[in-house]
Image (tube, rainbow, N blue to C red):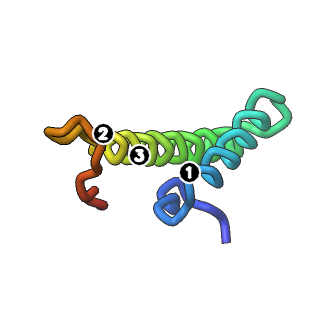
Amino acid sequence: MAKTPNDTASLSFEKALAELETIVQKLESGSVELEESIALYERGAALKAHCEARLKSAQERIEKIVVSADGQPKTEPATFD
């Protein structure tokens, strides 16, 4: 079954990034036909958006670390989508 641009939800950041890097290499090589290039570009755009969302989520979790009144770092419960 071919991968569609929108089936990225279950991918980890690392797997999505690795696939995106492979797509970039293929597109930069110029060795793929036009229709495949378009499909790869669409998949790459979906993977990029997925990676950006994962990074934003990680950043939000890190920002949950706060300093308590006594100056000690503490964490607040993170919410997950």
Which label was assigned to residue 13?
1
Q: Which residue is mark 3?
A: 58
Which residue type does callout 2 highlight?
Glu
Q: Does label 3 or label 2 sit earlier along the sequence?
A: 3
Q: Position of residue 10 (x, y in %)?
A: 51, 66
Which residue type does callout 3 highlight?
Ala
Discs 2, 1 touching: Cβ within 8 Å = no
Q: CA distance from mark 2 to mark 1?
A: 19 Å
Q: CA distance from mark 3 to mark 1?
A: 10 Å
Mark 2 Cα shell of 10 Å, populated few (<14), some (14-19), many (≥20): few
Q: Position of residue 21 (x, y in %)?
A: 70, 39
Mark 3 Cα shell of 10 Å, populated few (<14), some (14-19), many (≥20): few
Q: Residue furthest left?
A: 69
Image quadrant of residue 2? bottom right
Q: Which residue is mark 2?
A: 63
Mark 1 Cα shell of 10 Å, populated few (<14), some (14-19), many (≥20): some
Q: Is residue 46 left or right of residue 60?
A: right
Discs 3, 1 touching: Cβ within 8 Å = yes
Which residue type does callout 1 highlight?
Phe
Position of the C terminus by quadrant: bottom left
Under circle 3, the secondary element is helix
Under circle 1, the secondary element is helix
Please give the name of the residue rendered at 67% of the width and 72% of the height, measured from the top-left corner. Answer: 1
Image quadrant of residue 42? top right
